Image (spheres, rainbow, N blue to C red):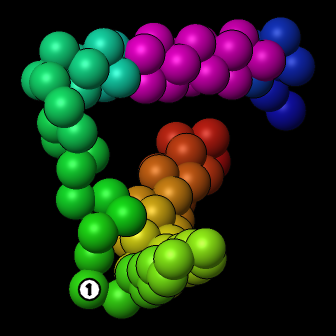
Amino acid sequence: MQDPFSAMGKMLFFVGASIAALGLLLMLAQKSGGNGWFGWFGNLPLDINIQKENFRFYFPIGSSIVLSIILSLVFGLITKFFR
């Protein structure tokens, strides 16, 4: 059986490294100007955007699918890391 403090240490290290990586990614995206690297997000082919005079409807199906795939890969790697 693994020491509980060792498992907690690994988890805290991974969470901290993930937050640092996300912060770095957001800083780099902001420096790229405008929509930058994330300009494609929300403008994919399956994203529904209807605009009328007094009405706006936005349903990001394509972006949700891409985000789901990315998060599935990330959580799969996390699970593999902790086993």
Q: Does the magenta stretch include residue 83?
A: no
Give the magenta part as a residue range: 8-23
Left or right: residue 25 versus residue 4 is: left
User: Dividing the picture into quarters, in which one does residue 75 lie?
Assistant: bottom right
Above or below, comparing residue 64 to residue 74 in the picture: below
| Viewer-nearest residue: 23 or 32 | 32
Q: Is residue 50 shown to the viewer in this render?
A: yes
Left/right placement of residue 79 relative to residue 7 reads: left
What residue is drawn where x is 47% and y is 52%? 74
Who's the residue at 62% across and 22% down the image? 15
Write the residue at 61% across / 73% down: 54
Q: Is residue 80 visible?
A: no
Q: Residue at x 37, y 64 (%)?
A: 42
Pick the front one: 14 or 33: 33
Q: Extreme left residue here?
A: 32
State whether the magenta stretch is mostly helix, strand or loop: helix
Vertical placement of 20 versus 72: above or below?
above
Instruction: Give SS at disc 1.
Output: loop
Where in the figure is residue 69, as x and y percent of width and height?
Answer: 43, 71
Residue density around tag 1, few if under 14, some if 14–19, many if 20 or more, within 10 Å: few
Residue 20 in the magenta stretch? The answer is yes
Residue indicated by mark 1:
45
